Image: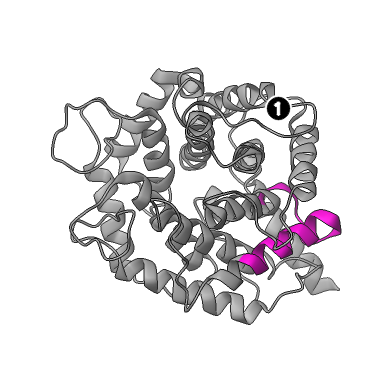
């Protein structure tokens, strides 16, 4: 009992350490809880969420549950989370997830991340999921090897496996974050591959501090807003900050503001990574707390205003006009945005958790 209390205290201190200082946004917890209830009620019989990209959207939904509470495997939501994780385990083979639509690596990366975070969190939780945790960890270990094997010669990743000469930023972001999460929970990764991924993203930075879609050695091209948020959030996971790169990215995000990201093609994606990046910057530089916390609050207020009466968040912009993935995509991302500053996912923290022996 004493050991359990010590571990629980350690987790609480890790989760809430370094939170950027800002006035809490009212209604965040209630809105997030309502969104998770909607997800639970709208899960498919096989445990998945989504339409075409069921691997990726099921991963987002699983991460949303994990980001929301200290004991994610309890109650109806816990059953839904476990069913989602079982679905992900069922569709992989030797750590490789199937290609869906135009992208394989997004599903591969986010599924690896979701399983890694679930397996890792289960080490601290009183209530364990009804799932083979040894097998889950083995799957994550195999999955990061698959990711590493598909790194391009440039250090980035592409949408399809085996594309050694092609690469871009969003694919690299999800691959790198999956590898960081696995390492956080004691799963072996190829550190050389990870270092090359970080270097790839740094080289995509433009003269204005924002980041380009892909590495093309053109520092004066138009920077992406959501893409910059993704790159800043990922580079924030470097054990050693590259000061100039991070400061320029930080200034770019402050300049464009969350309001600009709300009007872009992928607002949920942009706000998720924007909030994550600002949290990591606030942890590294305590004096930034007011600005990083203010950024997170502004993003959360926008996201809160979009929620429907039934708890669902609507698909927006590009995802809406392209047919989208339905409410599960938007609702899971929104729930994660509303929990980013609470730091329950290991990738929301500069320092990895101290693992129990």
Q: Residue at x 78, y 73 (%)?
A: 3
Query: Going by the image, does 1 lie left or right of 157?
Result: right
User: What residue sits right under mark 1 in the picture?
Assistant: 307
Image height of 121 relative to 228, above or below: below
- The number of numbered discs placed on residues in the rendered structure image is 1
Q: Looking at the rendering, in which quadrant would you find the N terminus?
A: bottom right
Considering the whole magenta stretch, tell me its main secondary structure: helix
Residue at figure coordinates x 77%, y 36% from the top left: 29
Residue 195 position in % (x across, y down): 29, 60
* Residue 193 percent across, percent down from the top left: 30, 65
Residue 80 or 289: which is nearer the viewer? 80
- Up-down: is 264 above or below 76? above
> Helix or strand or loop: what does disc 1 sit on?
loop
Q: Where, quadrant-wise, is the C terminus in this rendering?
A: bottom right
Q: Residues within 10 Å of mark 1 (few under 14, many from 20)?
A: some
Q: Is residue 80 visible?
A: yes
Left or right, residue 243 beside residue 3:
left
- Whether residue 53 is situated above or below residue 214 in the rendered picture: below
Residue in front for this viewpoint, 173 or 185:
173
For the point 50% across and 29% down, which residue is it? 267
Q: Is residue 155 left or right of residue 174?
A: left
Q: Is residue 187 visible?
A: no
Judge whether residue 187 is colored magenta. no
Range of residues picked out in magenta: 67-87
- Up-down relation of residue 339 to residue 85 (above or below): above
Q: Position of residue 343 (x, y in %)?
A: 62, 47
């Amino acid at each position: 009992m004493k050991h359990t209390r010590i571990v629980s205290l350690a987790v609480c201190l890790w989760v809430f350490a370094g939170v950027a200082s800002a006035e809490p946004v009212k209604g965040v917890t209630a809105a997030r809880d309502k969104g998770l209830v909607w997800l639970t009620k709208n899960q498919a019989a096989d445990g998945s969420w989504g339409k075409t990209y069921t691997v990726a959207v099921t991963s987002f939904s699983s991460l949303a549950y994990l980001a929301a509470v200290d004991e994610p495997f309890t109650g109806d939501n816990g059953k839904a989370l476990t069913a989602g994780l079982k679905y992900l385990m069922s569709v992989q083979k030797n750590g490789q997830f199937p290609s869906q639509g135009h992208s394989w690596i997004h599903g591969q990366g986010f599924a690896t991340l979701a399983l890694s975070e679930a397996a890792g969190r289960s080490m601290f939780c009183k209530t364990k999921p009804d799932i083979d945790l040894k097998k889950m960890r083995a799957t994550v270990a195999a999955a990061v090897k698959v990711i590493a094997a598909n790194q391009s010669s440039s250090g980035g990743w592409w949408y399809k496996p085996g594309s050694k000469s092609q690469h871009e930023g969003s694919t690299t972001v999800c691959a790198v974050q999956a590898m960081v999460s696995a390492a956080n929970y004691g799963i072996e990764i190829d550190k050389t591959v990870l270092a090359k991924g970080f270097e790839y993203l740094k080289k995509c930075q433009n003269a204005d501090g924002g980041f380009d879609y892909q590495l093309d050695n053109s520092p004066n091209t138009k920077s992406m807003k959501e893409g910059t948020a993704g790159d800043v959030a990922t580079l924030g996971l470097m054990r050693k900050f590259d000061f100039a790169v991070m400061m320029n990215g930080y200034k770019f995000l402050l300049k464009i503001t969350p309001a600009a990201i709300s009007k872009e093609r992928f607002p949920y994606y942009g706000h998720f990574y924007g909030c994550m990046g600002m949290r990591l910057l606030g942890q590294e530089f305590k004096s930034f707390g007011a600005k990083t916390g203010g950024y997170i609050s502004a993003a959360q207020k926008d996201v809160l205003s979009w929620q429907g009466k039934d708890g669902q968040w609507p698909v927006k912009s590009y995802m809406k006009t392209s047919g989208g993935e339905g409410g599960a995509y938007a609702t899971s991302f929104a729930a994660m945005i509303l929990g980013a500053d609470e730091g329950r996912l290991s990738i929301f923290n500069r320092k990895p958790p101290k693992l129990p022996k």
